[in-house]
Image: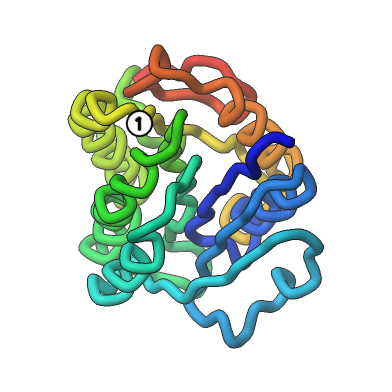
Amino acid sequence: MAEQESVLVVGASRGIGLALVERFAAAGWQVHATLRDPGTPGALARLDGDITLHGLDVRDDGQIERLRAAFEHRSLDVLIHNAGIMSKGRRSYDRETVMAVNARAPMRVAEALLDAVARARNGRIVLVSSQLGARQGRSGSLGDYGDSKAALNDALRAAAPAWAERGVTGVVVHPGWVRTDMGGPSASISAAESAAGIYALVGSLSASHSGGFYTWDGRTHPW
């Protein structure tokens, strides 16, 4: 019998993250999922499968350290960092908060879990970015959100060679324009469609993809 693979989805309480947990669990993976308050799991509690919840506020270094400690003696096949924020409607965040959550936190979490991912035979780190972070064709700033995703892309490209030396493939992915609270009701694909595409992408990743930027459906995205 093949060994059960494991995935950690950071930012899993709703939207794409929730759909990723459901997709991986349905495929028989051991799924670890983070949310800010595991005492109120919401829709996660209704999912079937081997799912373990972890509390995590990605802005809290102490909580990141506790998450690292939980995997100190484990291997982790895949880390998907999905947590992110955007000012929209009544929700407004200052630039520093957007940069902290969208650009710096994913790298801190990835570095904290790097040892666990490196223990896997084909460790992969997938950071959810956005096409709004692409610099090609940009004539100016795309606001705090776009700038934060551009910073995340740059950080991944800088870190990927060192990760690759440890046998870990690191990529960023544009999840598509998704019908979520962030994407809105007019978006072109559902969270389930995005998650299915990212699931397939994860399955195809190898060392040759390290440091790449991809779309949810597996195409190479320009930087």
Residue farthest to the bottom, as pictured: 39
Dividing the image into 4 quarters, which one contains the C terminus?
A: top left
Q: Between 220 and 98, which is closer to the camera in this rendering? A: 220
Q: Mark 1 falls on what kind of element?
A: strand
Dividing the image into 4 quarters, which one contains the N terminus?
A: top right
Task: Tell me where residue 94 appears, x and y as whole percent.
Answer: 27, 67
**Left or right, 58 with reference to 162:** right
Q: Residue at x 42, y 41 (%)?
A: 127
Q: Between 99 and 172, which is closer to the camera in this rendering? A: 172
**Left or right, 29 with reference to 73:** right
Task: Tell me where residue 170 appears, x and y as whole percent.
Answer: 36, 31
Q: Does residue 129 show up?
A: no
Q: Residue at x 52, y 82 (%)?
A: 37
Task: Tell me where residue 98 appears, x and y as whole percent.
Answer: 31, 60
Q: Residue at x 48, y 58 (%)?
A: 10
Amino acid type of the residue that numbered disc 1 sits on in the rendered structure: Val
Quadrant in which residue 132 is drawn: top left
Q: Does residue 110 show up?
A: yes
Task: Tell me where residue 76 appears, x and y as whole percent.
Answer: 46, 47
Residue beneath disc 1: 168
| Label total for image | 1
